[in-house]
Image (cartoon, grey):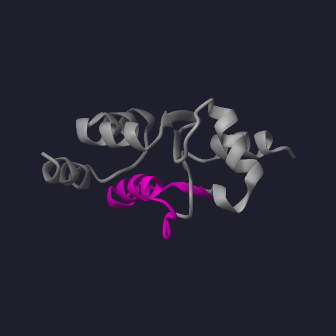
Amino acid sequence: MSAQDIIKQTVESNDVVLYMKGTKTMPQCGFSSRVAGVLNFIGVEYADVNVLADDAIRQGIKDYSDWPTIPQLYVKGEFVGGCDIITEMTLSGELDELFAAKGVAYDKDAAEKIREANA
């Protein structure tokens, strides 16, 4: 299977996927750490894909989304964005709305705590 096939299968078979440098328990860059930290804090179950483990996947995900940076978050097969977009969506409440609309479980109180801490 090609990297594109693997990526497509991963994105389509998991409700939430984070392509990142490192893993959700041990991020290897600050941007990946920020997005994983948000998802972990608000209790979202997600698949993490460490792009540092496979150069074909690392380049392949950039081609797949036509987005040049990592991390990349996918929800129900749809590319949502990278670190800056996820941060903005978290603080505005848009990420909550997206998860609710897509039927993804998350801790609404925890999401609110993030907004309160950053107000």
Q: Which residue sits furthest right? A: 1
Q: Is residue 31 magenta?
A: yes
Relative placement, left or right, of 27 versus 117 is: right
- Tell me residue 8's x, y (percent): 71, 39
Residue 91 percent location from the top left of the image: 25, 41
User: Is 72 inside the magenta-drawn segment?
Assistant: no
Residue at left offset 65%, top offset 59%: 52
**Image check: 72 left or right of 43?**
right
- On the rendered structure, is 61 left or right of 90? right
Residue 105 in the image: above or below residue 102: below
Which of the 4 image quadrants contains residue 117? Answer: bottom left
Expressed as whole percent of the image width and height from the top left, the position of residue 72 reads 53, 43
Q: Which residues are magenta?
A: 24-49
Residue 76 rendering spot, x and y as whole percentages:
54, 38
The part of the image, by quadrant, that contains residue 60 is top right
User: Residue at (41%, 54%) from the top-left corner?
Assistant: 44
Residue at left 39%, top 32%?
A: 101
